[in-house]
Amino acid sequence: MSLLRIHLILIFFILLVLSSYAQRTEGDENAGAENAEDVKKDVRSPDSVFVSFFFLNEQGAYTRYKVSKPLTHFEEYEVTRRNNQFYANLGNPGSASYPLLFKLNPSPTFRFRSDVYEPYTLKDDSIKFYISASPFSHLMYHMGPAKEQKFNIAFSQRIGNGIYLGLNARFANAPGLYLRQRAFNAGGTFYAAFLYPSQRYGAILTYRTDYSLNYENGGISDITNFTQNIESNRKVFEVNLSDATNRSKSNGFVLQQYFNILKPTVARKIDTATILVPRKFDAGRIVYTMRYSRTGTAYEDNTSISKSAFYTIYPTYFNDTVPIFDTIKLTHFENCIVYSNEVPDTLGKSFPLQYSFGIRFQTDKLLRDTTMLDVFRQTVPFGMLKGIIRQKTFFKASGYLVLGGYKSGDYSLDGSFYQFFGKQNHKAYLNVSKGMMHPDFYFTNYYTDYFKSAWDNSFGTQDYIKGEFGVILKGFDMKASYTRLTNYVYLNQNIQPEQYTNALTVLAAHASKEFRLKHWITTVYVAGQQITPDSILQLPALIGKLSLCYDVELFKKALHSQIGVSGTYHSQWYQDAYMPSLRAFYRQNNYISGNYPYLDVFININIKRARMFVKYEHFNAALMSYNYILVPDYPQADAAFKFGISWLFFD
């Protein structure tokens, strides 16, 4: 039987179901086009969506992106696996995680500690602001084993001339295969935007709320029950914690206003007609942004110490046998004023010289166990300059300096050069960064009533320098980087902060390419990193990802479908262990794992504006040894079917 015939059989039953629900074509298939000339230049399918979106930024330069519905990689619904991201987690979507590729993320903002749930949290700067002449909605639903469910809805509507309202709500629940492994997330964002038609003035207001609940089981008490596959029913395995949870609640709002000093366009008379054309000189705009956020976290454990194997592993960590209720609340308030003429044009063709200069006034209040209150106030001047050196050679320079507060003296200087070449604007680039940053406040001072091992340290600032060179050529994306970091701070094997005063170096490279040959699509991604010394920072030396699918359009191109297989591989490394009460990962040198491929098989389907996938994830789980672990004592999920659907509505 041919592959095409197998493909037809697999998708035929889905076609029958969707055919009765397929959205009918609108009467005006060019709705949303600005004028008749645009329609002639951009003839699209009746099922296309004429809507765009942008993200907030402090420069008021809103790059607009067209809403699209690509089918390739649609089956990768988990946020920690999209766009070649690689994380180690506790074996369940929504659980604590950390990146497996080294990332240097200096920031002028005060941070108590890194957030192990960061990939799953809602963020102000990732809110999509949809621009559409008609109401726009996007529904997404995913379903997995053990009643795993995830639901997202995005809605946007224009209610007046330049006035837009939008809502994005989400719900995710993953009970997991093991006892007390549940991860729950619920939240949403709301925005109201007034974008004056002449683009002279604009105001945007957002509100965000987010809540998460994670059951902490401390891992499997006896990991050999898993590695020897003694029992297929994972619920019967004993776990180390029987009544512990990590909870988090966050809310906040952002108000941003901008005013262009000159009108972006000028009237020009051509023959007998007067038209508006972009201004050759931009005097810039004034942008004011106000942010407020409040985040609270709580770790609660009512487990009896005498009955918990978890506490025998850390016998001196806890102060006594009382139940634990450890809380942290961080309140952030910020005012930011920027003068900028930056435009959303990555090639810089609009203006030969672009700039932005601003200043932030930040106040952070840290409340611990309702008794310890710390207040940090800092001022952060920053700036950016970019422009054309000649023809297709461009540069960009930026930096900031922190004055006052815990991070006083932190700075960052970044410089980049871009060289475009060829008719398709292939690119070569060089980035250099130099700076200094304080370790997270959590490393220097941590204390609660429940722990003996509270600490009060005085660590030196971390200095770093990073160089990066990359080439994007005919679909190839290749990059190599070198990072040198001194005074690196981490949690050691005793779950205590420690500073490595010598230089830590990271040499990293990655390459990716998508190959298309007739109906076949192959995507390859390879990343390598060499860390010296690897006893201080432990990450896999090699990570690879490969996807192969057969892509075909059927029934007069009414049905677009793909059937394929994908795999992810990590080399062996000493994995970081997890401490639930601290919401932190720490070094360990007893358990090593990796050198294992995770294989999936999938079917992706697109009919009009609906996309769906059926995926058999990690299908090789029962065919190989039981060593698929990314965090000690926390096995990854077994083989399972997963299903997802995404539907766009544009009326």
Image (cartoon, grey):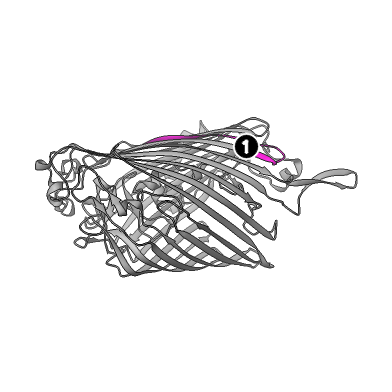
Left or right: residue 505 versus residue 633 is right
The amino acid type, in three-letter code, at marker 1 is: Ser
Residue 648 in sight in this render? yes
Mark 1 closeness class: few <14, some 14–19, many ≥20 residues within 10 Å: some
Q: Between 275 and 413, which is closer to the camera in this rendering? A: 413
Residue 78 position in % (x across, y down): 39, 46
Is any part of residue 171 visible from this angle? Answer: no
Identified at 48% across, 69% down, the residue is: 467
Residue nearer the viewer, 394 or 445: 445
Say which residue appears at 44% left-offset and 42% top-offset: 332
Q: Position of residue 1 (x, y in %)?
A: 41, 52
User: Please, what secondary structure does the residue beneath circle 1 have?
Assistant: loop
Q: Main secondary structure of the magenta part?
A: strand
Residue with the mark numbered 1:
132
Judged left or right of residue 521, residue 48 is right
Q: What's the magenta region?
A: 183-203
Residue 219 to residue 489: above or below: above
Query: Is the C terminus in the top left, top right, bottom left or bottom right quadrant?
Result: top right
